[in-house]
Amino acid sequence: MNTILLHPTDVLFFRDGRPMTGSLAGHGASWPLPNVLNAAFHAALHRADLPDVHEHRRGARGTYAENARRDRKFGSLVTAGPFPVNEENRSRTWFFPRPQDLQDGTLQPSFVPTAAFDLIQSSLRDPLQYAIANAQLPSKDSDIKAWLCKEAFERYLEAVGDEVLREGEAVDDSDIFDHEHSVGIAIDPDTDTTGQGDAAGKIYSAQYLRLRNDWRLGVLAKAEDKRFRHDRHGNDLVRALFNGGQRRIVVGGQQRICTAEIVHSNGVPLDPQLPIGKIGGFHKSKSGDVFVKWVLLSPAVWPEILDKAKDSKQIFDGNGQVIHHHPGGWLPNWVNADDGSVLLRHRAGDRSRDYSGPKARRISRVDEPICARLVSALVPKPLVVTGWALPDEAADEQGGAQSTHLAVPAGAVYYFEAYGDKAEQEAEKLATTLNWHGADTAPATIKNRRSTLLGEKGFGLGVCGTWQFYEDVAGRSKTHLSDS
């Protein structure tokens, strides 16, 4: 994938769905969600008017409406990010959201699963088995920061002990960007004037995001087109868009501009700068179960799945039977809501598409179940993912507000137990399936996006580490256990 750095030429505006009237500022200075950057690249490709690109029909998984027109472009665009990138002292350091189990100035988790409680009398949600315990003494002081650099993140995943953060390895939002506020007068959309129509007597306040010096928005993107061919850039529309140089693209609301460039090393695009997760070497319990935890690098959306007679999506349990309802929300759709079993399958070897059924599906030479279950989770408050679609007269679409989703934020931690006679192999299969890079420790592209929706826009990227029970963590006092 192409590694791209965005340098804003002005303040940026990323508002959510909350109102912007009176004293409400719309929260436009928050860090942008992945779908915002994906939309920016999609719009830039349309403006570039690249010749002879593949046009596809509306639909998914081989299911299309009758007489569907081929009027959709750039369906191959996939992105990841944005992540903060520091370019101080001519070096590039990528930062990622802090895992939620880190609550002090070290890389040793402070929130840890514990079995020292009464599961029957607890209010723990199904299918979880262990509560999260706080291993810290009560305090109002906090040393935690919002972002970790790649090297620190990978040391945290290794879980080798009380690792101490070095200088500059953790930063806060205030180190990366600042908030700016302004007050404006509402404009009537029909006349483009103020003081009349629906805008009469209305003002608004807004927040804007301004990146500090030496900070950039880091994005990974590619768009391999079936028909497009370029002498220098092959079939990659993103590389053709930049054509070896910089390009200005519109990012976020209010037509704000960023200067974007593909970062090269000796003329070759750099590999993705995301942390590499563990594939083996996980902790084991006395009974032989193997402990794997999965940490989100980007938000994930898992919708509620309703009755299959009304919903086109299908989820199957370990016996191949259709699951007719899944609550979604904080719980991944690929986890059985009744017993926590992992519904994903380990696939490896040559892959192809099978068109023999009612819908096209991918098949692999190796296709095996994974003997693992979700036993605990540490999930913060959800993010609101929404948007606005412009009208499309050619497609007879009215436009308006898009569907609103609640996403699990980056940094959420999910704890799994792999079990069975070959628990270690099952844990490796689980990690290969959940890690964004699969089993490849020197990846050139993103292989796994475990968000049910918006995966192509960069949602659902995660990496695997290992965990221990609170009672087995070395160096922790056992006298101040408190359920979190």
Image (cartoon, rainbow, N blue to C red):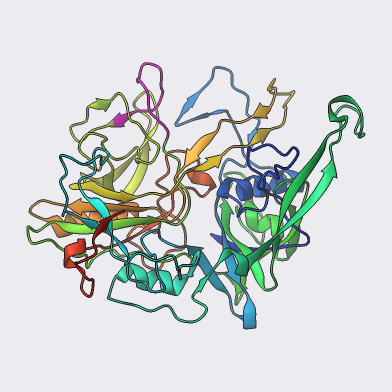
Residue 300: percent from the left, percent from the top?
Answer: 45, 45
Q: Is residue 205 left or right of residue 155?
A: right
Which residue is rendered at x = 38% and y = 70% of the image?
154
Q: Where on the picture, by quarter, is residue 332?
A: top left
Instruction: From this view, report whether residue 370 is shown above or below residue 356.
Output: below
Residue 78: percent from the left, percent from the top?
Answer: 54, 49
Instruction: From this view, report whether residue 8 is shown above or below residue 326.
Output: below
Q: Is residue 349 in view?
A: no
Q: Where on the picture, by quarter, is residue 104?
A: bottom left
Instruction: From this view, report whether residue 428 is shown above or below residue 327.
Output: below
Q: Is residue 164 in view?
A: yes
Marker count (numbered): 0
Instruction: From this view, report whether residue 367 is shown above or below residue 290.
Output: above
Which residue is rendered at x = 21% and y = 58% of the image?
291
Q: Nearer the viewer, residue 291 or 347?
A: 291
Q: Nearer the viewer, residue 99 or 85?
A: 99
Q: Is residue 283 left or right of residue 149?
A: left
The span picked out in magenta is: 303-315
Residue 19: percent from the left, percent from the top?
Answer: 68, 36
Asked if residue 314 lies in the magenta stretch, the reply is yes
* Magenta part, dominant SS: loop
Asked if residue 368 lies in the magenta stretch, the reply is no
Which residue is rendered at x = 41% and y = 22% of the image?
311
Q: Nearer the viewer, residue 324 or 56?
A: 324
Residue 212: percent from the left, percent from the top?
Answer: 69, 69
Which residue is rendered at x = 61% and y = 31% of the image?
402
